[in-house]
Image: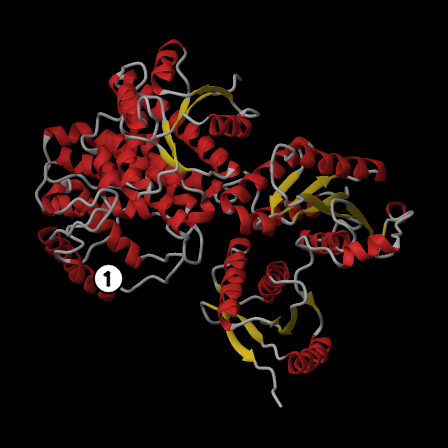
Amino acid sequence: MDKKLIYIIDDSKTILKYAESVLIGSYRVSLFENGPQALEQMRLTPPDLVLLDINMPQMDGYTVFRRMRDSSELKKIPVIFLTADTKQESEVMGLEMGAMDYITKPFAPLVMQCRIARILELDELHKHLEQMVEANTDELQKIFIQSITTITYAVDAKDRYTKGHSVRVAQYSLALAKKLSWSKQDCMNLYYTALMHDIGKIGIPDTILNKPVKLTDEEYRLIRSHTTMGANILRPITMVPQICDGAKYHHERYDGKGYPFGLKGDDIPYVARIIGIADAYDAITSNRIYEKAQVQDYAVNELKKGRGTQFDPYLTDVMLEILQDGFEFTDSPQFEFEEDEEQKKENETDAFIVEVCKQTENDISRVKDVDSLTGFLIRRSFENQVNAYLDNHLNRGVMFLMDVDNFLYVNKNYGHIAGDHIICRLADTIRAHIEADSLTCRISGDEFAVFFPNERTEQWIESTANSILTGFQKAISDIDTDHMLSVSIGISGSKNPLERCKYLLQQCDKALYYVKNNGKNSYRILQRDSGAFNESQNKGFQIDIAQLKSRLTEEAPALGAYSVDYSNFEKIYRLIARSLSRNKKDAQIILFSITENIHGTLEISDLDEAMSILERCIVGSLRKGDVTSRYSSSQQVVIMIDSNQENGHMIAERIIANYFRMYDNYNLDLVYNIEEILAKTK
């Protein structure tokens, strides 16, 4: 398939060349120093996307964009503004004109690559929807209903804490419309509009949607862009009037303090005011990543507080009446009001909607077993399938456990979007070096597992491991960062058909731990008969004094905190206390505790897994020299040396965020307490 063509329009030759160097490996790139020249060439060879600077002397970016929108040939080309102007008004103006995104200079290469890939993906969806509309056949209505329902479930599935949100908002909105005595057709249009109100979230990375701690300003700006992004996606749909308004304006407030444009009162489209109330009520009463579901009394009070400020006062009163009468969800939308001939003719269509909804539910239930970023199995499904194989086959298999070295450094310094980019490249590398019957899994954030059925020779295992190591280095060779990314692999083979997947992973983890402590970017095979490592891999594995000094004084992110048993932890604590007294420095002691959300449902195996992941998050997040130990079956204690409480809270929250990204058992919660260890002064 031909590479996409991108035009970069900027009056700075330096920016042009830099942007070209970032994109040239993945796209065809054409450079232009002024708008008129680019517009002339566009008519001859239209690009797939345009990166457009705003402040240019001959013709500014806004003018270039307007000329494109005035041209029937160029108006559908997606545009990203590329500018050093950080004023919010400029960003709002560009998005309001119809730009797909806004990147400020100087830009991060990985961020630019991710955003361009996302915009091009959305543009393909846009074109597909447009082609459906242009078909204009009798079958289009059914295709539209199926597509709109499927997309709705796909959007909700991205945020695991809001499953069914769009359907619930649509049903609340439908109830409001019926209470207002709208016609059946208007009710149906509102229902479909509400179903699609969050479609713009399909372009927001899952890591941001599911982030359990406070968003950064950039992440919050990206989340807010789902309104205008959604409107751009829905623009080709003409069979539902005002469908764009629901997506674009449902976060506007009646007092003018909403977004994206700060519309006020009656300036906000009526359908958006209805959807806004329904959306807010469901947000309050649903389980969200940042808070538990609120009871209805609390939610009703919140609606009353927002009457006339956040919400249309009249519509608020109508919503409160509906809730007071006792609102109930249904399995399918009920558009019927009175029995008439027109309704009877439409019964077949309504039945089709129900069938599509049920079928889509089944499709999504299968999708839930797959990691949305990589397409690999999630851990629970992976373990079930490996166990099923081991239960039904006498043949043995081989397990690979892989981890990205120095991955936390990438997330910290380049952001989670860049981290996702790395994860996808490793996933592609793994996919290229496995067989059709292999089982692949994303265990946690940067950890992957592959189970190869059947017995394998040692030569085959070593060849496959080496291919993955070199393949990953080749896959990231174009990334210009200083984080020394590589992969470490722990390997173990099944010796008994009664063994379980979790046991195999534990054996691999031992081998992986060895690799992590002996140079990384390598693999080790655990010899199951002896519990030792393959000696052939260790031949000549000696270092001289220079290498030893280099390893001991290594500045790159490596082991993180020391993890010791509790008896040694007490000795280290006393050593630290004496050192603090001598050096007049302070330290923080943090106690992490795993608790149940629903009392009495805790399983020991789940707790062991949670504690193992917590310890890994702590070791990877802290500095070298900090110390951690398991205090009890559900608690982990940490000492941070030469640190104040502000830093302690910041690190603790980062550990909790990493933990929730890696572990998806929502019956378990993680909390912490922190105290200061003061240096004794005499």
Which quarter of the rendering shows the C terminus? Answer: bottom right
| 319 up-or-down from 676: above or below | above
Query: Please, what secondary structure does the residue beneath circle 1 have?
Result: helix
Give the percent coordinates (x, y) of residue 589: 58, 75
Q: Which residue is mark 1?
A: 299
Write down the quadrant of residue 233 in the picture: top left
Q: Residue furthest top?
A: 44
Image side of residue 116 versus residue 319, left or right: right
Number of numbered discs overlaid on the protein picture: 1
Q: Classify 10 Å Cα crowding around label 1: few (below 14), some (14-19), many (20 and above).
A: some
Q: Residue furthest bottom?
A: 682
Give the percent coordinates (x, y) of residue 423: 58, 41
User: Please, what is the three-letter code of the amino acid marked with disc 1?
Assistant: Ala
| 173 up-or-down from 626: above or below | above
Write down the quadrant of residue 302 in the picture: bottom left
Q: Nearer the viewer, residue 449 or 520?
A: 520
Q: Nearer the viewer, residue 507 or 494?
A: 507
Image side of residue 496 versus residue 206, left or right: right
Identify the residue shown where x is 52% and y is 30%. Answer: 18
Give the percent coordinates (x, y) of residue 294: 30, 63
Q: Is residue 434 visible?
A: no
Give the percent coordinates (x, y) of residue 168: 28, 48
Identify the residue shown where x is 80% and y is 48%. Answer: 525
Identify the residue shown where x is 38% and y is 17%. Answer: 38
Write down the quadrant of residue 188 in the picture: top left
Q: Nearer the viewer, residue 487 or 528?
A: 487
